[in-house]
């Protein structure tokens, strides 16, 4: 049996052929495994990173622009998953400046949601003024660092920090009172 080229395997995988995807991955498993082993020290974590890499590759295969560069594309996905792994570990180990866990406070002073919680956090961020909302979404929902947000938005890091500060203040204040209601005299 002659070895199919990458382009043909990609076409078959996009048609739902998981065996073709498996063959494509087998071709590049050595460089993927070597990269992940170099960047992630714990064997259990390496397996998780590899699984996330393969899942992302399967889900995003249709977005691969240059099929001749499938190896580089897979390696980049693995690098991103390794970076995400360490970013999440660093956040778990990094204390907040004042040594307490920060929560978002409603206008009654109760916790609305903890950082990183899904839908409640999205809803809370929707109440943030538009000038800070995009920055808050990138920081809290996408997990980007201040430096990454600064590069993405072409905005100084100090401005990003200021927007995050004001977004947190808005979250603590809670929803604005309804000013359209008429008072009876």
Image (cartoon, rainbow, N blue to C red):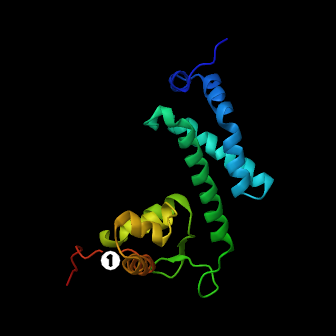
Query: Outermost residue toward the right?
Result: 43
91 and 25: which is toward the camera = 25
- Quadrant where the image shows the N terminus: top right
Q: Is residue 177 above or below residue 44?
A: below
- Visible residue check, residue 126: no
The residue depicted at 74 percent of the width and 52 percent of the height is: 37
When asked about the image quadrant of residue 113, the answer is bottom right
The residue depicted at 72 percent of the width and 55 percent of the height is: 38
Q: Is residue 52 above or below residue 137?
A: above
Q: Position of residue 54 (x, y in %)?
A: 63, 40
Query: Outermost residue toward the bottom?
Result: 98
What residue would you read off at disc 1?
177
When asked about the image quadrant of residue 85, the answer is bottom right
- Visible residue check, residue 157: yes
The residue depicted at 56 percent of the width and 76 percent of the height is: 103
- Quadrant where the image shows the C terminus: bottom left
Q: Position of residue 4 (x, y in %)?
A: 59, 19
109 and 45: which is toward the camera = 45
Q: Position of residue 157 (x, y in %)?
A: 41, 77
The residue depicted at 43 percent of the width and 81 percent of the height is: 165
Left or right of 13, for residue 150: left
Q: Is residue 25 above or below residue 96?
A: above
Q: Position of residue 101 (x, y in %)?
A: 62, 79
Q: Secondary structure at mark 1?
A: loop
């Amino acid at each position: 049996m002659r070895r199919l080229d990458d382009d043909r395997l990609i076409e078959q995988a996009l048609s739902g052929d998981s065996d073709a995807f498996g063959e494509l991955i087998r071709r590049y498993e050595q460089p993927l495994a070597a990269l992940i082993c170099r960047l992630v020290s714990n064997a259990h974590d390496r397996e998780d990173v590899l699984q996330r890499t393969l899942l992302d590759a399967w889900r995003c295969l249709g977005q691969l622009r240059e099929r001749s560069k499938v190896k580089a594309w897979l390696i980049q996905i693995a690098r991103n998953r390794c970076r995400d792994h360490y970013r999440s570990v660093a956040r778990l180990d990094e204390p907040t400046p004042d040594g307490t866990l920060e929560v978002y406070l409603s206008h009654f002073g109760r916790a609305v949601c903890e950082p990183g919680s899904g839908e409640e956090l999205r809803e809370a961020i929707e109440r943030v003024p538009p000038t800070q909302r995009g920055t808050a979404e990138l920081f809290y929902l996408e997990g980007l660092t201040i430096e990454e947000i600064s590069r993405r938005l072409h905005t100084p890091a100090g401005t990003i920090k200021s927007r995050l500060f004001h977004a947190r203040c808005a979250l603590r204040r809670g929803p604005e009172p309804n000013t359209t209601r008429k008072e009876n005299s």
